[in-house]
Image (tube, rainbow, N blue to C red):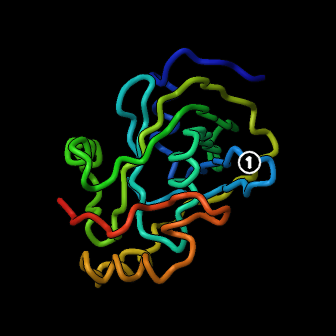
């Protein structure tokens, strides 16, 4: 039923790159801290960097729990489900880090996402995950669902922001600079965009 993989390649890589949706899970070290689970979409915003490294674009939103948890402890799990075709669930357990807009690595990391224009989405960071455990499971109970199209709401909402107004938006939200559990979140002021 379940199998452990040494690397992300071949059929496994093809599967995760084809999925229009994946989930991220993180948690603080505090035993009573808030576990965070987030859906991630937008075609072209996920990339396999190498056989043990994946990355995704972190866009504007109303909180920054994943960033806060990664800054504190780095633990993250990514999960993909097959909603079409043969049943399958793939999880990548690993260590992640947010690479912010003022990091020298940021511009090079963006080259892994040639099929998406990150500018209209309020790009905050690139989340880089180094895989420590790669597994799949059957997915027999995951329902069939169809992928119709991408929503354009996120781009329409954040395309009208420039760096100054985006920074102001982030400062107005209580859980972007600081997480729900009081951990440091997105560093503010927001560094200027390089894209």
Secondary structure of the residue carrying tag 1 is loop
Percent across and percent down for residue 92 are: 59, 33
Q: Closer to the camera, 113 or 133?
A: 133
Who's the residue at 74% across and 48% down the image?
30
Residue 182 located left or right of residue 105:
right
Percent across and percent down for residue 86 are: 66, 37
Figure check: 187 above or below 46: below
Marker count (numbered)? 1
Who's the residue at 36% across and 61% down the image?
124
Who's the residue at 29% across and 48% down the image?
113
Which quadrant holds residue 141?
A: top right
Percent across and percent down for residue 28 are: 67, 48
Q: Quadrant for the C terminus, please.
A: bottom left
Residue at the top extreme, as displayed: 6
Q: Closer to the camera, 91 or 97?
A: 97
Who's the residue at 60% across and 38% down the image?
75
Residue with the mark numbered 1: 30
Residue 118 located left or right of residue 37:
left
Q: Residues within 10 Å of mark 1 (few under 14, many from 20)?
A: few
Q: Quadrant for the N terminus, please.
A: top right
Percent across and percent down for residue 82 are: 63, 44
């Amino acid at each position: 039923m379940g199998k452990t993989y040494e690397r992300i390649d071949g059929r496994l890589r093809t599967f995760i790159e084809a999925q229009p949706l994946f989930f991220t899970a993180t948690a603080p070290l505090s035993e009573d801290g808030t576990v965070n689970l987030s859906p991630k979409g937008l075609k072209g915003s996920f990339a396999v960097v190498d056989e043990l490294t994946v990355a995704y674009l972190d866009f504007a939103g109303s909180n920054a729990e994943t960033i806060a948890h990664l800054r504190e402890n780095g633990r993250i799990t990514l999960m993909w489900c097959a909603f079409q075709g043969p049943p399958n669930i793939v999880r990548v357990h690993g260590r992640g880090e947010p690479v912010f807009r003022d990091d020298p690595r940021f511009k090079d990391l963006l080259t892994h996402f040639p099929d998406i224009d990150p500018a209209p989405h309020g790009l905050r960071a690139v989340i880089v995950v180094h895989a420590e455990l790669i597994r799949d499971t059957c997915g027999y109970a995951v329902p069939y669902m169809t992928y119709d199209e991408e929503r354009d709401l996120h781009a329409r909402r954040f395309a009208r922001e420039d760096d100054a107004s985006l920074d102001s938006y982030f400062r107005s939200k209580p859980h972007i600079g600081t997480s729900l559990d009081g951990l440091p979140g997105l560093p503010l002021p927001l560094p200027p965009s390089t894209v």
